[in-house]
Image (cartoon, rainbow, N blue to C red):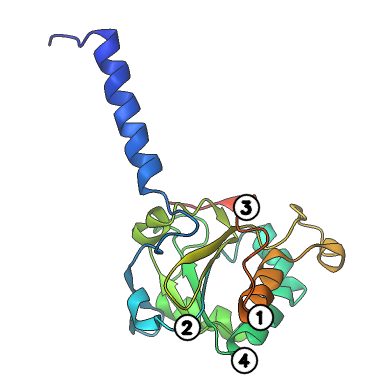
Amino acid sequence: MQRLPLYVTTILCSLALAGIIEAAPKIGQPAPDFTAIDSRGVSHALGDYRGKIVVLEWTNHQCPFVGKHYGTGNMQALQQDATGAGVTWLSVISSAPGDQGYVSDAEANALTAQRKAAPTAVLLDPQGVVGRLYDARTTPHMYIIDATGTLVYMGGIDDKPSTRHADVKTATHYVRVALDEIRNGKPVSRPVTRPYGCSVKY
């Protein structure tokens, strides 16, 4: 097989990388549309929620960073406050079968009940289609889409990249602040932050 010249290979790699970057979601642009099935067998399309604020939360119950936020009740409180104010909250599980965090429908429902979680729905994404569409990298990785369908926040849940439960009390809660700003008609002051946690197990 004839080998391509180095400069041709470099160009092709650059084009491929550009395609990946172009495909990544962008703040201020329409959020990537998707359709996914939840843990109760119901289909959810992002377009169905136009006119509402939507939060996407990538999660993995076996990840200690996720465990910090559920173990302290922080994630549940945020979910309850958000959904109580009319926000649609979609927890997304993109772990592949056999990998850490993968769950069946029944297991996902049991976890929701056990942890007293309060998302609108838990979306199962075992093929990683939605996760890759949003370039979700960690659990948790958080995204907020405004009522016009525009992506207005992506990043960490807060500024304390640790598994220490005590850090929840002293953290700057990026998602909570962003939701408050949106509901008050203000632009999100920090639309992009660094996500932290376990890698998504595609």
Dot 3: within a 10 Å radius of its alpha carbon, few (fewer than 14), some, or many (20 or more) residues? many
- Is 90 placed left or right of 19 in the picture? right
Q: For residue 149, what is the image quadrant? A: bottom left
Give the number of the mark in front: 4 or 1: 1
Q: Secondary structure at mark 3?
A: loop
Callout in the foreground (2, 4)? 2
Q: Position of residue 68 (x, y in %)?
A: 73, 65
- Report the residue at 81% width, 58% height from top: 164
Instruction: Find out whether the residues at labels 4 and 1 contact each other: C-beta distance under 8 Å.
Output: no
Answer above or below: position of 43 versus 131. below
Whether residue 4 is visible here, answered yes or no, is yes
C-alpha gap between disc 4 and disc 1: 16 Å
Q: Which residue is mark 4?
A: 84
Tag 1 residue:
184
Which sits earlier in the primary sequence, circle 4 or circle 3? 4
Q: Are marks 4 and 3 in contact (CB under 8 Å)?
A: no
4 on left or right of 161: left
Kindly report the distance in space between the C-alpha atoms of the residues bearing marks 1 and 3: 25 Å
At label 1, the amino acid type is Asn
Q: Which residue is mark 2?
A: 52
Is residue 20 rendered to the left or right of residue 176? left
